[in-house]
Image (cartoon, helix red, strand yellow):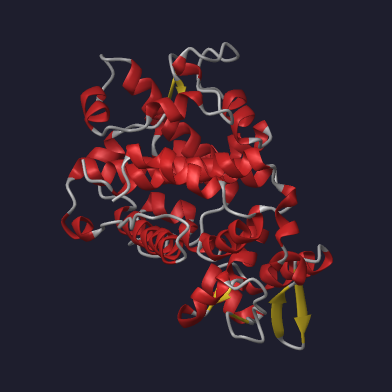
């Protein structure tokens, strides 16, 4: 299993890879992206119904920031409820507090805000204040204690510690992530990009202890927070990223061919074409919305269409597709991913 001591070594080895190899590996990783936002395994309690089967970015981003911000506050204040439990979870608090994409006012790093206000959440998520206010309203209707004069908006940890809300969905997503990242690490080892074989163990998820599960909860919200921030600085929006992810339909038996220098993704069967119905089914995005998003991606030269079949373009399969992200951004994304893997799957 990856430990904190392994992160720097993996980052160093991957930083030396040629850009075309990094590009193909990122495409393989991106193919699982859409699954990480589904809420399909829950029973449908009132709060879960608020989010629906696919969580909207504008709904999840403010909530995720509010949860991480409350974690930071609870960690720093020994008299806060659940302080000891947060300490025992061994979370990467320093990553939360020092990340360049966020300003957590409870950390005393930022002097911009005195508490977690609508303005603070808007500043950190990039959404207009009225949008944030509107998206938080259903939560306040269900959990009116999620706001007070001292802290502003915060997340009552009773929901985490005293209920099983979202548990089935969170564990389902964690297993999906484990499969995606395990495949990526296995491919890196098989291609001799890294010398050590890393295994991500999820056997303990079937009988997981409370603190290990709650750490998965927190790290998932950290993952979502980061995703929305990186997406906000990219040429594609959230729905476009999900649809592109669904269009990267890799054949499991042919994944190894992705390392071939001149591989032709479709003629050699490495990627299979998709259609509107299959995208809608896999992303849980309404078909009419999928149609509009596909047309948008066709205009951006990300997708192309032949009769009913939809393909990614040569622009996407070419390493130049990554020029939209600087080397520094790609390194930051890699670091964030490794931190999340390490802290999500190692049991407390």
Q: Quadrant of the C terminus?
A: top left
Q: Nearer the viewer, residue 135 or 197?
A: 197
Q: Position of residue 226 (x, y in %)?
A: 54, 41
Examine the rendering and report whether any part of residue 105 can be seen.
yes
Left or right of 304: which side holds 90? left
In the displayed structure, would residue 258 be above or below residue 110?
Answer: below
Classify residue 212 by image quadrant: top left
Left or right of 118 in this view: 84: left
Residue depicted at 50% across the width and 75% down the height = 255
- Report the number of discs: 0
Relative height, residue 187 to residue 265 (above, below):
above
Front-most of residues 10 and 112: 10
Location of residue 266 (image quadrant): bottom right
Residue 280 visible in image = no
Farthest residue toward the right? 299
Q: Position of residue 17 (x, y in %)?
A: 57, 53
Residue shown at 59% from the left, 67% from the top: 285
Image location of residue 259, percent across then percent down: 56, 70
Which residue sits at x=48%, y=12%? Answer: 108
In the shown orientation, is residue 70 left or right of residue 32? left
Q: Position of residue 160 (x, y in %)?
A: 29, 40
């Amino acid at each position: 299993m990856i430990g904190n001591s392994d992160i720097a070594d993996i980052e160093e080895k991957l930083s030396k890879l040629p850009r075309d190899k990094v590009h193909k590996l990122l495409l393989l990783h991106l193919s699982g992206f859409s699954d990480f936002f589904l809420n399909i395994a829950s029973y449908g309690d009132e709060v879960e119904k608020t989010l629906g089967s696919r969580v909207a970015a504008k709904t999840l981003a403010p909530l995720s920031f509010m949860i991480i911000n409350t974690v930071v506050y609870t960690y720093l204040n020994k008299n806060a409820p659940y302080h000891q439990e947060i300490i025992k979870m061994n979370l990467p608090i320093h990553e939360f507090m020092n990340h360049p994409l966020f300003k957590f006012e409870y950390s005393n790093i930022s002097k911009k805000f005195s508490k977690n206000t609508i303005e603070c959440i808007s500043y950190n998520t990039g959404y207009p204040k009225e949008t944030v206010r509107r998206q938080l309203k259903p939560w306040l209707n269900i959990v009116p204690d999620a706001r007070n004069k001292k802290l502003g908006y915060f997340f009552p940890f009773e929901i985490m510690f005293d209920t099983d809300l979202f548990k089935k969905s969170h564990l389902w997503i964690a297993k999906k992530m484990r499969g995606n990242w395990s495949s990526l690490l296995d491919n890196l080892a098989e291609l001799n990009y890294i010398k050590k074989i890393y295994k991500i163990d999820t056997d303990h998820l079937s009988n997981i202890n409370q603190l290990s599960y709650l750490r998965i909860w927190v790290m998932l919200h950290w993952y979502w927070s980061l995703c929305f921030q990186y997406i906000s600085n990219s040429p594609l929006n959230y729905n476009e990223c999900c649809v592109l992810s669904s269009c990267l339909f890799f054949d499991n038996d042919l994944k190894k061919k992705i390392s071939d220098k001149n591989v032709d993704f479709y003629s050699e069967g490495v990627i299979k074409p998709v259609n509107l119905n299959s995208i809608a089914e896999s992303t849980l995005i309404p078909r009419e919305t999928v149609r509009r998003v596909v047309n948008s991606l066709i205009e951006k030269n990300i997708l192309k269409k032949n009769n009913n079949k939809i393909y990614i373009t040569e622009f996407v399969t070419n390493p130049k597709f990554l020029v939209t992200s600087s080397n520094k951004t790609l390194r930051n994304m890699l670091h964030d991913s490794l931190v999340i893997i390490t802290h999500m799957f190692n049991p407390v």
